[in-house]
């Protein structure tokens, strides 16, 4: 498969759905990717086994906050700066790129950077969706070292972080992000092609393109009836008239309830789609009266393991008392959530902008507009 400007709109729409309400500005990065494809031609998407097992694969993405990303989209030099430093640190050429996360803007960032560098994209990513923290990756679960990690900006100013685990990478990256002015490029969890199939979420690029062409059926279609802090109420319309669901959100949508029953929860992917355009609606874009379809997609199986749930499940976001995945299998939505509680304080850890590095939970509704 090649990603060209004919396939890009569907691919970008799928990335936005997999962003689960977060992940940064997809329209902005789609425009960047479109220009890169126009200037440099299509990007080839390959399977891990098409590479030599020892080939170096460079995960990559943009890090920062959505507000900064929209006004400061970066330049063309970041992928070259990252590649140069990664090759120096690992002693071999980068043979392919991989999105650090497929969900949100970074799915399109990877396409643009692959076009700039003339490299293929491996059909995989680190998350299968968007998560707010840099260490919430399948590579972390499989014991791949996050370092040496490379951070840089559009001027080529570069920071290398080494000899730390994923959580320490988060802490140090936050400090670097402030110095970089709220936006930077990163590559972490660099790996070899032989490790990609066993240690990442494979098929991510194919899935995003397919989702964009065939959007999933909604759990409910209705209108946003209220947005208060991290809680969103959606009132059913049409065939769903009389239904009312509550969605809990931080940087992404985390859980969906109806009459006290749990319909969906992280690490599964929850997305709200504008019923007029079919485009995914981010948490920060929610407004009273918006007509939306609420959809749910299964996460990669790695997130249903005990270690995966500890890293990316409800309790990782401060949501306690939710049923485990064995109690809320697809097709069995009516599971009561005993003792559900929301976190009383901001959760630690930075997040991608584009998925990563936002720090405390981001409010939606009136607070987000201040």
Image (cartoon, rainbow, N blue to C red):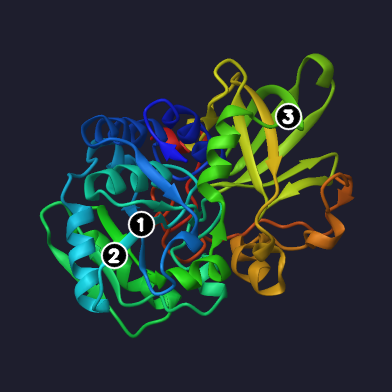
The circle drawn on residue 88 is: none
Q: Earlier in the sequence, mark 3 or mark 2?
A: 2
Callout 1–callout 2 Cβ contact below 8 Å: yes
At mark 3, the secondary structure is loop
Residue 303, can we see it? yes
Classify residue 287 as left or right of residue 328.
left
* Percent coordinates x, y for residue 286 in the rendering: 53, 30
Estimate the spatial distance between the alpha carbons at disc 3 and disc 2, rounded to whole Å.
Answer: 39 Å
Name the residue: 76% across, 56% down.
340
Q: Label 2: few (<14), some or many (≥20) within 10 Å?
A: some
Displayed quadrant of residue 76: top left
- For mark 2, what is the residue? 94
Mark 1 to mark 3: distance in Å?
Answer: 32 Å
Mark 3, other Cα within 10 Å: few <14 / some 14–19 / many ≥20? few
| Local secondary structure at mark 1 | strand
Residue 36 placement, left or right of 97: left
Residue indicated by mark 1: 97
Residue at image mark 3: 217
Q: Which of 229 and 167 lies nearest the eye of the viewer?
A: 167
């Amino acid at each position: 498969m090649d990603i060209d400007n004919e396939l890009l709109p569907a691919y970008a729409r799928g990335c936005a759905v997999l962003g689960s309400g977060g992940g940064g500005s997809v329209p902005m990065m789609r425009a960047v990717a479109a220009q890169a494809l126009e200037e440099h031609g299509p990007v080839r998407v390959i399977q891990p086994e098409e590479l030599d097992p020892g080939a170096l694969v460079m995960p990559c993405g943009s890090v920062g906050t959505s507000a900064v990303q929209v006004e400061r989209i970066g330049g063309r030099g970041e992928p070259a700066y990252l590649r140069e430093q990664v090759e120096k640190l690992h002693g071999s050429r980068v043979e392919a790129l991989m999105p650090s996360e497929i969900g949100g803007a970074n799915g399109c960032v990877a396409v643009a950077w692959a076009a700039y560098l003339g490299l293929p994209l491996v059909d995989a990513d680190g998350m299968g969706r968007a998560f707010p923290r840099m260490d919430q990756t399948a590579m972390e679960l499989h014991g791949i070292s996050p370092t040496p990690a490379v951070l840089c900006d559009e001027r080529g100013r570069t920071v290398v972080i080494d000899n730390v685990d994923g959580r320490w990478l988060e802490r140090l990256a936050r400090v670097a992000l402030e110095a970089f002015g709220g936006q930077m490029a990163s590559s972490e969890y660099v790996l070899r092609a032989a490790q990609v199939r066993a240690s990442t979420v494979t098929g991510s690029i194919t899935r995003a393109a397919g989702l964009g062409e065939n959007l999933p059926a909604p759990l409910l279609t209705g209108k946003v009836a209220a947005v208060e802090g991290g809680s969103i109420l959606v009132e059913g319309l049409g065939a769903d008239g009389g239904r009312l669901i509550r969605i809990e959100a931080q940087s992404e949508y985390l859980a969906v309830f109806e009459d006290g029953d749990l319909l969906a929860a992280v690490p599964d992917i929850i997305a709200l789609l504008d019923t007029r355009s079919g485009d995914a609606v981010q948490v920060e874009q929610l407004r009273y009266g918006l007509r939306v379809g609420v959809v749910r997609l299964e996460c990669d199986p790695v997130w249903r393991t005990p270690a995966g749930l500890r890293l990316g499940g409800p309790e990782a976001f401060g949501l306690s008392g939710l049923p485990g995945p064995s109690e809320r299998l697809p097709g069995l939505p009516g599971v009561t959530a005993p003792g559900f509680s929301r976190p009383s304080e901001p959760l630690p850890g930075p997040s991608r902008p584009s998925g990563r590095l936002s720090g405390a939970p981001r409010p939606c509704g009136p607070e987000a507009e201040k």
